[in-house]
Image (spheres, rainbow, N blue to C red):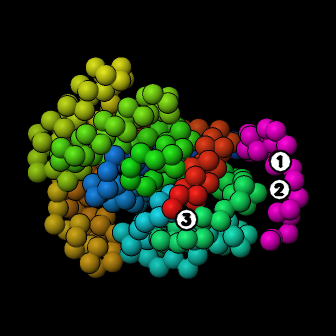
Amino acid sequence: MPDGVGDQAASLRRPGARLDAFKALQSKRALSCFAVASGKGGVGKTFIATGLALALCALNRKVLLVDADLGLANADIVLGVHTEFSIQDAVFKGMPLRDVVTKTPYGLDLLAASSGSKEMVSLGEARMSSFIRDLISFAAEYDALIFDCAAGIDSAVTSFIAAAPQTIIVATSQPTSVMDVYALMKIIHQDNLSKNVGLVVNNVESDEQGRMVATALARVSEKFLLRPMDLLGVIPASGNIVRALQQRRPFLVAYPDDPAAERLKSLARTIVQRQTASTKAGGLDGMKIFEGLLKKGGEK
């Protein structure tokens, strides 16, 4: 056990101690924070998260991408980078985040997770609380923090959505994707997880197809959830996405002039112009992140 963890554990047992500790972390720097989620897997969520992160870097933003999918982490694969360390090293070995974060050649910093690791099932509250404190403090150095959530609607995903000021939901034109987005929106509404939800329709054959998906989801959202869903962008299908993966190069780097790449850049510009997700690092809900990672670690 790293030095100091025992003392932290004792202090964290006091009622409200963890929440007070998280709230005490303040920063003068504005931070744009997003949780990128999807109702189902296979819709290109990590592609959108990594593409948005790289596009924001190109706009001179300092970006930290957190792979919040502790079970099937793959942001490193999409970015084509080798990660020596991961979240597990910070949690179990007490490594400073500055040493754990992977500095990519593209100006993006990645906090990776270990895919398929069983270590996280033995998480303790003291270890996780210490990690979250470090993460929120460390995030104060950045202009943007992006959580690449796992697919689905389990408690780990919803905790990250609740922690971030804005949620970006990724969908495709597949009926299963549309239905799963509705299910995710229903949970967000019922549990009051987020009031700032945007939609990105990915992998479409035409803008019309993307707008049809967005219109259908907006109608359902307004009718049943009493909340509109803002369309942030439509990303066209591209064979170059698979080619970039095969080349182990980020799509925006390998094919910067591809129409899908141009749309990702446009998405980043839209977000910068709106700045709807700006907060202070101390304003992030550390307890929600804590709960999400702890619950994820306890799932088998």
Q: Is residue 165 above or below residue 42?
A: above
Q: Residue under circle 3? A: 111
Label 2: how many Cα within 10 Å (few below 14, some 14–19, many 20+): some
Residue 55 is at least partly visible in this image: no
Tell me how far mark 2 sits from mark 1, CA to CA: 6 Å
Image quadrant in which you'd find residue 168 = top left
Q: Is residue 110 above or below residue 184?
A: below
Task: Give the mark nearer the N terminus: 1 vs 3.
Answer: 1
Residue beneath the point at 44% across and 33% down: 188
| Residue 83 image position (x, y, % from top left) | 51, 77
Q: Residue under circle 1? A: 13
Amino acid type at image mark 2: Ala
Residue beneath the point at 55% across and 65% down: 111
Image quadrant in which you'd find residue 173 = top left
Amino acid type at image mark 3: Leu
Tell me how far mark 3 sits from mark 2, CA to CA: 24 Å
Is residue 115 toward the left or the right of residue 28 in the image? left
Q: Which stretch did the figure color magenta?
A: 1-26
In the image as oriented, which residue stretches furthest toward the front?
Answer: 300
Give the structural element (helix, strand or loop) at label 2: helix
Q: Is the residue under label 1 in contact with that under label 2 (CB below 8 Å)? A: yes
Give the structural element (helix, strand or loop) at label 3: strand
Q: Nearer the viewer, residue 201 or 105?
A: 201
Q: Nearer the viewer, residue 126 or 95?
A: 126
Residue 9 is labelled as 2
